[in-house]
Image (cartoon, grey):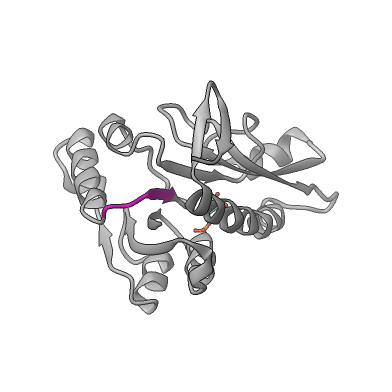
Amino acid sequence: ARLVVLVSGAGTNLQALIDASAEASYGAKVVAVGADRDGIEGLARAERAGIPTFVRRVGDFTSREHWDLTLTDTVAAFEPDLVVLAGFMKLVGSPFLEKFAGKVVNTHPALCPSFPGTTGPADALAYGVKVTGATLFVVDEGVDTGPIVAQTVVPVHDDDDVESLHDRIKLAERTMLVESVGRIAREGIAVKERRVIFGR
Ligand code: GRF
């Protein structure tokens, strides 16, 4: 399966996918990496692995829709079987989701439907939950609302700050992402009502 991965930051989730796909038996390969900003470690990781990269910055376009259409065309040119949003800090729009219907997954550092948005680890800590985690889901039009592919749980420690908690989440998140993306690549998924079922 051909993966296009979109990133906005450190790219540790991307790196885990690149490393996993070194084994042919994994069943998926990162064929391109895109970003919404320049100069990030995620792009450098792709370049070091010899993977083509592209940057599409919202600010360079006259409208958000134009950005979305261009992003859609750019990703489509790589003919992905699956698009993985791995720490991509932009919401993709309707044209993108229509083009890649059911084939876009995102990883979120909280247990959906709790703590959606960009501050999941901080919100979990502030709320005082004793467990949190990460969620892989099929992207829909909402913010972290799509059908759930997989979840992984981590404890919240008494002495955690946002960074230590997010670091623990990211460790578990990477394992979940690699396992689930491989399984999607090898087995396929279908969404029935809200439930994600593996298999073709
Ligand atoms: C991940 O925890 C992701 O879920 C969140 O931001 C982090 C990205 O990490 N939205 P990285 O860029 O993959 O290292």
Q: Please name the residue shown 43% across and 48% down the image.
A: 85
Asked if the stretch drawn in magenta spans residue 109, the answer is no
Asked if the stretch drawn in magenta spans residue 82, the answer is yes
Looking at the picture, how far across and down is residue 105, in whole percent?
A: 47, 43
Q: Please name the residue shown 21% across and 42% down the image.
A: 67
Q: Residue furthest left?
A: 62
Q: Residue furthest front?
A: 200
Q: In the picture provided, is 75 more to the left or to the right than 163?
A: left
Q: Is residue 107 visible?
A: yes
Q: Please name the residue shown 53% across and 68% down the image.
A: 25
Looking at the picture, how far across and down is residue 72, in whole percent?
A: 24, 43
Q: Is residue 39 above or below residue 200?
A: below
Q: Which residues are magenta?
A: 79-84
Q: Nearer the viewer, residue 27 or 111?
A: 27
Quarter of the image where the N terminus is located: bottom left
The part of the image, by quadrant, that contains residue 7 is bottom left
Q: Please name the residue shown 39% across and 76% down the image.
A: 49
Q: Residue furthest top?
A: 193
Q: Nearer the viewer, residue 169 or 183?
A: 183
Q: Nearer the viewer, residue 114 or 119?
A: 114
Q: In the picture provided, is 89 more to the left or to the right than 112?
A: left
